Amino acid sequence: VRGEQRLALLRGSELLELSATLERFEAVHHASAATLEASAVAVGARAEALELRTEAADAVAAAAQLRGRLDEEAGAFAEIRGRLEEEGDASVQLRRRLDEEAERAEDAFGKLAESRQLLEEQSGRMEDVVGKLTEE
């Protein structure tokens, strides 16, 4: 009986040791699971950060392309503005020439009117002379 008691005590103590070992194993297992979960969260956060960096780099590249296009369009607008200013200058010069020609034309019409008046006066004198000559 004593041997059986002893054997039962040994088995009881082995069971206690096994139970304690199992508890330690479960604690380590839970800690490992928590560590793995925290690692997975960290990896997810890193992946998300990497994705955000990639999106930011894409946005920077798109902004640089837009800036390039805007610079090209600004250059084109500046070129058009330059042409318009040149055409405006040419238009002003043409307007001055037209004004000068109009003044010359007015002067010429004035001279023509004077010449016509002189011709009419001379024509009237000629008629007078012809009338006097016909009377004589």
Image: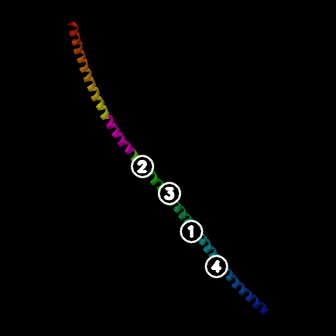
- Going from N to C along the chain, the mark reached first, 4 or 1, is 4
In the image, 72 versus 56, the foreground residue is 72
- What residue is drawn where x is 31% and y is 33%? 101
* Circle 2: residue type: Glu
- What residue is drawn where x is 57% and y is 67%? 45
Q: Which residues are magenta?
A: 84-98
The residue identified by callout 3 is 65
Describe residue 84's horizontal placement relative to residue 45 as left or right: left
Residues tagged 4 and 2 counted as in contact (Cβ below 8 A): no
Q: Which quarter of the rendering shows the C terminus?
A: top left
Task: Name the image quarter holding residue 29.
Answer: bottom right
Viewer-side label of 1, 3 = 3
- Distance between the Cα atoms at labels 1 and 3? 28 Å
Q: Check disc 4 and report its element: helix, strand or loop.
A: helix
The residue identified by callout 4 is 28
Q: Check disc 3 and report its element: helix, strand or loop.
A: helix
In the image, 79 versus 101, the foreground residue is 101
Viewer-side label of 2, 1 = 2
- Going from N to C along the chain, the mark reached first, 2 or 3, is 3
What is the x, y in percent for residue 16?
A: 70, 84
- Going from N to C along the chain, the mark reached first, 2 or 1, is 1
- Distance between the Cα atoms at labels 4 and 1? 26 Å
The residue identified by callout 1 is 46
Q: Check disc 2 and report its element: helix, strand or loop.
A: helix
Q: Is residue 1 above or below residue 59?
A: below
- Distance between the Cα atoms at labels 4 and 2? 75 Å
